[in-house]
Image: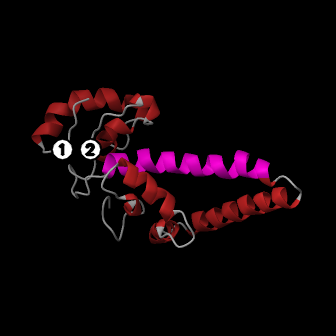
Amino acid sequence: MPNDPLLDPDHQTSAKGPWSAIWTSIRERQPNGRRQQNYLASLERAGRKDLIALSFTYRLAYFAILFALAWTGHALEAFLLWWLPAQIGSTYLLFFLSWAPHHSGAQGRYRDTRSFRSRLGNIGSMGMQYHIVHHLHPYIPLTRTPAAYWDMRPILEARGCNIAEL
């Protein structure tokens, strides 16, 4: 359930503003952060132990490669080509996929997400400006959510959805 502290694996990215969301994303990925544990707990609740095993295998392989690169004298390359891009990409993804569309913190079918204007546009925000359409109709392809949003906008407004001026 979106925005539920116990059931939403992305709830740890909740923050008051964009810079706070970025800092929270970085902080939650640290060894004492809760993000990974909540994601694994959500997979367990869904009965996807296969994905838990795959996640551990991926992480083990990633750190083994980083270690091997550092051990063989390629620590700087490992940092600049593997670790740093992964951290930047994770922060970007968590910002646009978790915080930006959900940061209202409200719960309910028409309130747990929102539309928003992104300075990076629809492509830069990965289509999440119209994420409210995904929550209501998850089978509409991402490439068609802008058109669906504009068609449904009067209905969304009437239902009390969090609608931004796009």
The kind of residue tagged 1 is Cys
Q: Which mark is residue 114?
A: 2
Q: Which residue is mark 1?
A: 161
| Label 1: how many Cα within 10 Å (few below 14, some 14–19, many 20+) | some
Q: Quadrant of the C terminus?
A: top left
SS at circle 2 = loop
Q: Position of residue 25 (x, y in %)?
A: 46, 57
Q: Position of residue 128 (x, y in %)?
A: 38, 39
SS at circle 1 = loop
Query: Camera-side residue: 111 or 84?
Result: 84
In the depicted structure, whether residue 52 falls above or below residue 132? below
The kind of residue tagged 2 is Arg
**33 sits left or right of 64 in the view:** left
Asked whether the beta carbons under mark 2 and mark 1 sit within 8 Å of each other, the answer is yes
Query: Camera-side residue: 60 or 136?
Result: 60
Magenta stretch mostly in which secondary structure?
helix
| Label 2: how many Cα within 10 Å (few below 14, some 14–19, many 20+) | many
Magenta-tinted stretch: 76-102
Figure disc tally: 2
Q: Position of residue 47 (x, y in %)?
A: 49, 69
Q: Position of residue 65 (x, y in %)?
A: 78, 58
Residue most extreme to the right: 72
Q: Residue at x 31, y 34 (%)?
A: 117
The tag earlier along the polypeptide, 2 or 1, is 2
In the depicted structure, whether residue 30 falls above or below residue 80? below
